[in-house]
Image: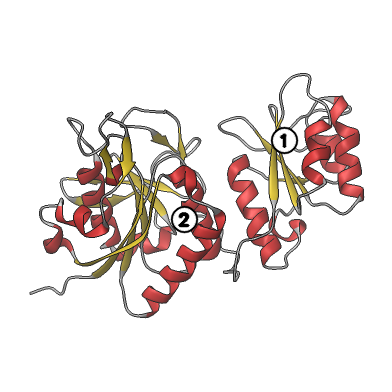
Amino acid sequence: MKKRPRVLLFALGGTISASPDADGRNFPARAAADLLGSIPGAKEIAEVTAADVKRVPSRAVTPADMCALAHEIRARVAEGYNGVVVTHGTDTIEETAYALALQLDAGVPVVLTGSMRPPSDPGADGPANLLAALRVAATPAAGALGPVVVMHDEIHLAPRVTKVHTSRVAAFSSPGLGPAGFVIEGRVRLHVSTGERDFLGLPERLDKRVELVWVVAGCDGLLVEAASSAAGGLVVAGTGGGHVPPAMTNALRAAVERGLPVVLASRCGGGPVLENTYGGEGSETHLLGALGLHSAGTLAPVKARLRLMVALALGKSAGEVFPA
């Protein structure tokens, strides 16, 4: 008889664990063991150990929680687990997945999953998502992908995945790439053999404040000034290929001159920050060249924030982790 892999199931709460109150509003309530018990056939896939980490909606998950989870996963993998599944609310699952990609070089599958429909709703997707996640976690080849998000039988790489709809079951996508694989007929089918290398290192804690300023038409430097007065780093989600209104540039220049690391990302859902297409005040050539901002490349603003946060916690400069 083939030996089953050892998989650890960590539960953090979210819709997949929810139960309704008297008014029909859902709150995280179910433990990891309850989630595991809802999956028929789990014992045939792996030897699964269930453990509770937190029981919160994902809007309450913090970078400190993500760092603590990375430490816990590293310790358990060292004990001999062959894969890890993390159940998580979908609001910030992409952020936790990428934070783990930055902090873990586990060598085993690390899979995050959740649900869009509460367990009490008709057609609840949690059990199917958890079953698919367990299958991926029990597939050794998935370990080369880095942490992944498995939803709707799709396998998404942590640097790329994002939530693109507030409520539909097929709520996740990877713009510019698509899924790295699927779970079909109970089998894991991978389209790629390796993921993007985003590992930076595992800090003791994530406590460096990095703020995100979203650029909109007509904005000035007010939010940049406010954020840079308290933060250790700043990410600017520029328009288009990485642009800001001219009225914002003086505040950005002042922040850089004070030594604040400032990263330029795009608020668009896909594509890289441009490098040399447009000129003039507030263009990408002005921001990256004359002002000294660092390009986030294809990273979404929320993930660029986490990358800078981990870098600062490790004592690395923005230039080291956002090379020109």
Q: Is residue 290 visible?
A: no
- x, y percentage for residue 243? 76, 30
Closest to the observer, 178 or 165: 165
Q: Is residue 209 above or below residue 298?
A: below
**If you read the primary sequence from the N terminus, does the residue marked by circle 1 or circle 2 appear first?**
2
Outermost residue to the bottom: 79
Q: Which residue is mark 1?
A: 274
Q: Which residue is mark 2?
A: 195
Closest to the observer, 109 or 208: 208
Q: State left or right for residue 207 relative to residue 149.
A: right
- x, y percentage for residue 130? 25, 50
Q: Is residue 289 above or below residue 46?
A: above
Mark 1 surroundings within 10 Å by alpha-carbon count, few (fewer than 14), some (14 through 19), many (20 or more): many
Q: Is residue 294 above or below residue 217?
A: below
Q: State left or right for residue 16 relative to residue 262.
A: left
Closest to the observer, 58 or 172: 58
What amino acid type should be assigned to the residue bearing mark 2?
Gly
- x, y percentage for residue 172? 40, 36
- Badge 1 vs badge 2, beta-carbon distance below 8 Å: no
